[in-house]
Amino acid sequence: MSGVATMTEPLLEVEGVDKSFPGVRALHDMRLELRSGEVLALVGENGAGKSTLMKLLSGIHSADAGHFRLGGEPYQPASPRHALELGISIIHQEFNLVPHLTVAQNIFIGREPRRGRLLLDERKLNADAAELLDRLHLRLDPRAVVGELTVANQQMVEIAKALSYDPRVLIMDEPTAALNDAEVATLHELIRRFVRPGTGVIYISHRMEEIKRIADRVTVIRDGEYIDTLDMATAATPDIIALMVGRAIDTEARPEGVRADREVVLRVEGLRTRDLLKDVSFDLRHGEILGFAGLMGAGRTEVARALVGADKAEAGAVTLHGEPVRIATPADAAKLGIGYLSEDRKRFGLLLDQDVKANIALSALRQFTKAGFVRDCALRAKADRYVGALRIKTPSLDQTAKNLSGGNQQKVVIAKWLAKDCDILIFDEPTRGIDVGAKEEIYQLLRELTGQGKSIIMISSELPEILRMSHRVVVMSEGRVTRVLDADEATQENIMHYATLRPDENPADAAELGLAPEGKAGQS
């Protein structure tokens, strides 16, 4: 944790705040207290009101009722710029960077030093950025183009930009969604250096283990209302989750193994791409959830994209229900009953400006057209069926997808492929950015789908999720499959062992794992 604050006076107070939008009450009698010198975690399900509260604090919206105090004084930001001037800086989950500009230009955009009235002082700009980055212990080149940086380094640029305003309150919304463990540790160390008497952090995250490590207290909100605030040192994770969702959740459940005599619905052999994949082989059985685990860059997403034809494979054979098939494009995969749910649902899974019913019908539009015209009644009936079956929270079928919470957006993507009636579904990071309660609904849905005879490939960076959901686990390292583990032998320790192996450089390990000389994994 950041170290319990020694100063207990409130730095930021939220009292009795209400906020409504047409047809939706987003916040009611909301309360929050951030103490000087502390990290306060803010948790709640998607749609609980976290984003609305942050928009009020950052000056994007104004409250209908209630009041805010910052450092004991009334706080009423008229705009995001005004909020920054008053001392509150926010780092949004979605990056707000200009890719073709440099690190320094992004940090000081709109505040660039000038020589005279017209000319930018590029030398001073880079020097100021270098001084800031050095103070924050961030190893970034001020002259580097942001679009060429890794996602983790782009996140660090966002943080540097927020801290360049010398805020009293730093709000971080899912700051580690795209970071690995080492990068999370770097971020947490930066937060600890920032927090001191007179400053504080509001830390929004769905990752309970992470919150335990960094936060002093945790505030829980549900359905737009304040629920409770707990000391993190004594709060139990199951208790926090129960407060979030209003019920107890069993987070320790594990699946039983799938019988080896079940039909192999999909077999992939010797899948290879030019850049990364090397002779990847595995099979998927009827009614199975096959998990894919590995470190960042191991090739899990690349396997999925090559399998469905989104990326070109140089070699490899795919067999579907015992018959060889050729998949050159995602459209080919869809025709064969294979649906791919991308990890980036907003970019590749949804038409954000279209409504819920249009998104659900997207993959099966031919079902709803006749003589070139869309049969709206049939389309609405199908969309309404899946909205009900998946418990998608939306005011209506005509709600635009971008206005739904992350968990409900994910459900719309799932509904799209269910409408297509795919027998094989590939879920890439199915619960990224989704709260605990919505995760449980997704997990239950996956179990129901396999119970109906669907077969699922699930790619996830969260080992607890892999262990909880997978009947078998395919472990990858550096573009190769290093092991296929049954549920009873899959542990975090085993998975991490095989995820860090390099069998091409260690013949002894390769022999131990039962790998063929060219690197193919034996089927378990």
Image: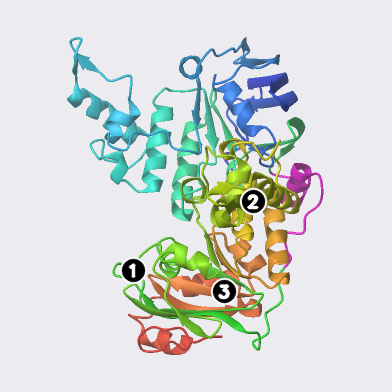
For the residue marked with disc 1, what is the amino acid?
Answer: Leu
Residue behind mark 1? 276
Q: Give the range drawn in magenta.
A: 233-253
Mark 1 element type: loop
Measure how far apart labels 2 and 3 are at the Cα level.
Answer: 24 Å
Q: Categorize mark 1 by other alpha carbons within 10 Å: few (<14), some (14-19), many (20+).
A: some
Expressed as whole percent of the image width and height from the top left, the position of residue 185 reads: 48, 49
Measure how far apart labels 3 and 1 are at the Cα level.
Answer: 20 Å
Residue behind mark 2? 411
For the residue marked with disc 3, what is the amino acid?
Answer: Val
The answer to whether residue 250 is magenta is: yes
Residue behind mark 3? 473
Regarding residue 153, the answer to whether it shows in the image is yes
For the residue marked with disc 2, what is the amino acid?
Answer: Lys
- Figure quadrant of residue 256: bottom right
Pick the quarter of the image with the C terminus.
Answer: bottom right
